[in-house]
Image: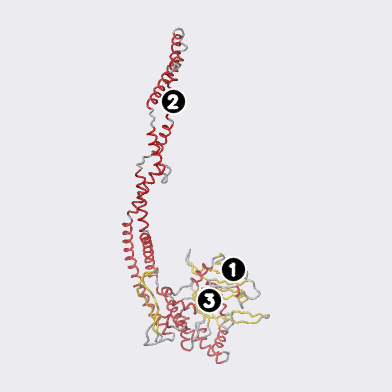
Amino acid sequence: MLKTLTIENFALIENVTVEFGAGLNILTGETGAGKSILIEALGAILGNRLGASKIRKGADFLRVKAVFLIENSFPARDIVELTIERKISRTGKNSVAVDGKPITLAQLRKYGAALLDMHDQNKNLELLREKEIYRLIDTAEIYDALKVFAESYGELNSKKRSLAKKLSAREENLQRLEFLRWQAREISAAKLKPDEDVKLDAEIKKLSHAEKIAESVQASAQILNDGDFDVLTALARVSKHLDAVARYDDKLNPARKLLEDAEIALREAYDEIRDYGDGLDFSPERLNELHARADEISRLKKYGASVNEILQRLEKIRVDIASVENFDSDVSELQAEVGELERQTKICAEKLLVLRQASANNLSAKIEREIQRLGMARAQFEIVVEAAEKLSENGGDKADILFCANVGEEKFSLSEIVSGGELSRIALAIKIVLASEQRGDYDRVMVFDEIDTGLGGVTAKTVAECISEISRGWQVLCITHLPQIASMADVHLQISKSEVNGRTLTKVTRLNEAERVNEIARMASGEESVASIENAGEMLASAQRFKLAVLA
């Protein structure tokens, strides 16, 4: 519910705060008094486009602030205030805030859509869009079914994209498979062994220096045992001399023991050096073979920096080959999954269709009765939901509104035949039905901007009664020129303008009962005569009786 609307420096309005009440709030006034400014101010709260040209002359900015009373369910069900404020500056520094916290214009539109329902010519035209038709007929049960459909439809599209990607890659996969097989053959032909390159390099290094190694081995053996002054012969002489000393003194026995151990160790070393030398077999042919093998491995190092990495790459290639070779089975599996998902999604779509058709039939009958009540006694109205050729994110159906204003004529799509006046009354009939099914929606505000255009007589009275009925469930703001509608007000606000110090100012006055009589008299006859005042009093009394009957 809209509690107050404060408008500052907006066109003719310098500063005004309008206090609204529950039920039906009627706004009346002479043409040009500023009623449209209030509608534009409400539009600003909805997030409509608003430029600096609307800023009052001499001011640097305009500001619109709306305070709503909304039902809060946590931590307890109570009524709390929600403040939305929008400021437009000549410098371009604009701002939007909810309860003092800055938000974006897109976020404001979400807030506005949840709080205000604007009923004007542009809003009426939205009825011609299929999306709006679904918003009318989709119930909570349908939304649940739509959620299930959307999940299935989303999964179906995902699988279809995967399948299409697989199929488009068929030729590329065949080429890749041949390339992978060629790589595998090239690596496999080399018959590599783990760490082969490390061992190969070591052997090449040894054979490349075989002559120098042989010389060093021979020289080492001669120094130890094969020379004229070899180490082992010298040790034997030292041991012989120490044996002579031992006959007379045993103090050098530890030294003798060390020499014995040294002789044993040196003889072992000599044997190893001799055996190594005997095993040396320098072969130029073998070295050439090793170099050739090293060159072969080097050519394969495009697959890895070492033999072990090349072998790891071979395993990866084999895995890739297996994956590509499974392409056809993957495609078949995806095709089967797509087929099953299509079946499931169609079942969900068929359930949606049945639910929507039932809802559309129910709503069509109610709306048609209200349209006939609003002065089109022979009008026919039908919301038609039919199966569509293709599935979409909205289901597997299509929706349209068929209408005929005259008896005996064929119904056609509303978008093709309806006039502006007819569309306005159809929209009002829809609001009446929706309001009757959503009574007690405390948060919601419905705004009617000159719903009375082109109306008069009995139809005007019926429209007035309909709007009054809507206000039993919603808070309604209605700008009108018709006294029949104004007489139904729970809160009557008069918009007027005056000249103060050479400037035009718009003000909003909440009328008391006596002032209401005078305003309705003026609206009905253009003057406040005795007859017009009596007529106005009767209209107010009649309206009061109707409201009491509705409440009863």
Label 1, label 2: how far apart the Cα atoms are:
95 Å
Task: Please give the residue where the numbered disc 2 appears in the rendered image.
Answer: 215
Task: Please give the residue where the numbered disc 3 appears in the rendered image.
Answer: 21
Q: Is residue 538 left or right of residue 289?
A: right
Residue 94's disc is 1
> Dots 3 and 2: beta carbons under 8 Å?
no
Q: Nearer the viewer, residue 444 or 178?
A: 178
Q: Is residue 4 left or right of residue 386?
A: right
> Dots 3 and 1: beta carbons under 8 Å?
no
The amino acid on which the numbered mark 2 sits, given as a three-letter code, is Glu
The amino acid on which the numbered mark 3 sits, given as a three-letter code, is Gly
Along the polypeptide, which appears first: circle 3 or circle 2?
Answer: 3
Residue 49: quadrant of the picture: bottom right
Q: Position of residue 178 (x, y in %)?
A: 35, 52
Q: Position of residue 243 (x, y in %)?
A: 43, 10
Q: Residues within 10 Å of mark 3 (few under 14, many from 20)?
A: some
Residue 43: quadrant of the picture: bottom right
Frontmost of labels 3 and 2 is 2
Along the polypeptide, which appears first: circle 1 or circle 2?
Answer: 1
Q: Label 3, secondary structure: give it.
A: loop
Can residue 394 be seen at all in this image of the molecule?
yes
> Dots 1 and 2: beta carbons under 8 Å?
no
The quarter of the picture where the C terminus appears is bottom left
Residue lying furthest top: 248
Q: Label 2, secondary structure: give it.
A: helix
